[in-house]
Image (cartoon, rainbow, N blue to C red):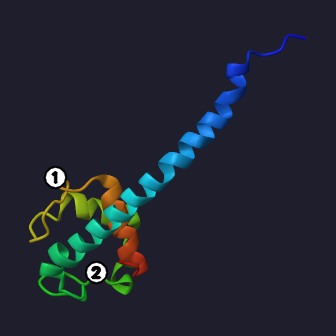
Amino acid sequence: MQERPRRFQLWPSLALASVAAIAPAVAARAGGDAARLASLVRQDCGSCHGLTLKGGLGKPLTPEHLQSWSRDQLVGIILDGVPGTPMPPWRPLLSEPDARWIAERLQQGDLP
């Protein structure tokens, strides 16, 4: 039986080392994004939905109020707004994963 060249035996170790090196940077970015998005919700969304998100010009963004909406519906509202209301589209400023993160945190009442 032929022995594989040594370079092919090293790739799993190199792949694992690469993941270990990149993971802290990805985690730091995710944490930074969470802080940025939480600040956006508190300040920008809070300007209409109330600083405590319990309602104002806009409806409350509490888990109790949002339970009747699916996550996909909330993501659509965040990204595309609600025509005929003051709710603007945030698609120019937010990605779909950002909007999904916001919707999840609001439904769970878990906004950092």
Give the residue drawn at x 43%, y 78%: 108
Nearest-to-viewer mark from 1 and 2: 1
Q: Position of residue 91 (x, y in %)?
A: 20, 54
Q: Where on the picture, by quarter, is residue 28?
A: bottom left
Instruction: Answer with left or right where residue 19 lies relative to residue 93.
Output: right
Q: Position of residue 102 (x, y in %)?
A: 33, 68
Residue at the spot of label 2: 61
Q: Is residue 73 visible?
A: no
Give the residue drawn at x 40%, y 69%: 104
Q: Position of residue 3 (x, y in %)?
A: 83, 14
Q: Position of residue 70 (x, y in %)?
A: 40, 68
Q: Determine the residue located farthest toward the top in the rendered image.
A: 2
| Residue toward you, 51 or 14 | 14
Give the residue drawn at x 12%, y 80%: 47
Instruction: Answer with left or right where residue 52 lies relative to residue 28.
Output: left
Give the distance between the C-alpha atoms of the residues marked 1 and 2, in whole angstroms: 21 Å
| Residue toward you, 37 or 15 | 15
Q: Amino acid at mark 2?
A: Leu
Helix, strand or loop at mark 1:
loop
Q: Amino acid at mark 1?
A: Pro
Give the residue drawn at x 17%, y 86%: 50
Residue at the spot of label 1: 92
Disc 2 packing (10 Å; few <14; some 14–19; many ≥20):
many
Please report whichever mark, 1 or 2, sits nearer to the chain's N-terminal start: 2
Disc 1 packing (10 Å; few <14; some 14–19; many ≥20):
few
Instruction: Answer with left or right where residue 62 lies relative to residue 21.
Output: left
Q: Is 39 located above or below residue 53 in the figure?
A: above
Q: Determine the residue located farthest toward the front in the rendered image.
A: 6
Q: Where on the picture, by quarter, is residue 35?
A: bottom left
Q: Where on the picture, by quarter, is residue 89?
A: bottom left
| Residue toward you, 97 or 112 | 112
Helix, strand or loop at mark 2:
loop
